[in-house]
Image (cartoon, rainbow, N blue to C red):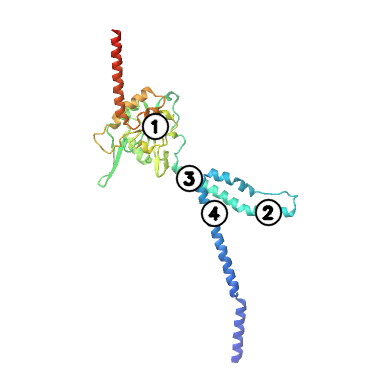
Amino acid sequence: MASASTILNEQVARHQDDGSSSPSPSNAASSGRFWGFFKFGVFGALTGAAATAGYATYAYTLEEVDEKTKAFRKSAEYDVGDDVPALDKFQAMLHSASMTVPAKSIELYLDLRRAIEEHVRGFTEPSSEKLLPDLHPLEQHVFTLVLDLKETLVFSDWKRERGWRTFKRPGVDAFLEHLAQFYEIVIYSDQPPMYVDPILERLDTKGCIRYRLSSSATRYQDGKHYRDLSKLNRDPSRILYVSGHALESSLQPENSVQIKPWKLEADDTQLLDLIPFLEYVARHRPADIRTVIASYQGRDIATEFIERSKDHQKRMQDQRQQNRLWRR
């Protein structure tokens, strides 16, 4: 049986062996500081890269960033020939290694930004550079009448007891049928096709409307859908856009004819009142409709046109009267 002193000596020896195998407090502290500095450095580098990318995205276009970093990315491809000294090869290797990561990071940023901008453009830009097909050669003289739908031709509202209902504006049938003789009529709405198509199927039973454009054909910016008439593939001097919200929904106000938005007023005559002006334009074909619209700036076109027509008729009557007096 082992004595008490022998057992005590074995425990002391075992404790000494364990102490010699564990790291000293100073080594553990040094290791912790190293990993702390390493993690801080990585975090700082990532934060700096993110801040730089954010600033570049805010301050420069994709093309500008590509152009400004082209020389730097090119320098990462630095190379030397086989017949240079070993020291030069070593320096070239170090240079390439130090430049490769930043250059590749920039290329990755450009690729990601290009992909994101193309994806976003699909939601914000019109679906095509040419929203309408080419005009037939025999119709090059025809003007294009672009009409909004909501609060211009129809009004939709919702009530709890019946849900959604859509109402036709007074005179809309006569308006479309008459002007289809003179114009290429296009509906340009900021609503999705699931809203536009069913309404037009019921509204345009005589096929007066040639084309329908919905929200995918608009330009989305600042939280709003805008009609971009420059994408219609038509001569801008022959485009009229009529809407209850024309000046605030079109990127080309010089082509826009503002009328009163319709909100179920039973005595509304806006569409019928506008027919004489639109028919006059179609028959006389002014060189640039934008100049004509500008002459009515700040006035109600339908009312002002009637007044001008009356003045013109009076002048013509006075002139005929004077001619009859001279002949006598």
Residue at 55% in and 62% down: 40
Nearer to us: label 2 or label 3 = 2
Q: Secondary structure at mark 1?
A: helix
Residue highlighted by disc 2: 93
In three-dimensional space, the C-alpha distance between marks 1 and 4, rounded to whole angstroms, equals 47 Å
Residue highlighted by disc 3: 119
Residue at far left of view: 267
The amino acid on which the numbered mark 1 sits, given as a three-letter code, is Asn
Q: Earlier in the sequence, mark 3 or mark 4?
A: 4
Inspect this view and state whether residue 226 appears. Answer: yes
Residue highlighted by disc 1: 255
Q: Position of residue 123 (x, y in %)?
A: 44, 43
In three-dimensional space, the C-alpha distance between marks 2 and 3, rounded to whole angstroms, equals 39 Å
Neighbour class for label 3 at 10 Å: few (<14), some, many (≥20)? few
Q: Is 258 on the left or on the right of 90, as rendered? A: left
Q: Position of residue 159 (x, y in %)?
A: 26, 45
Residue highlighted by disc 4: 49
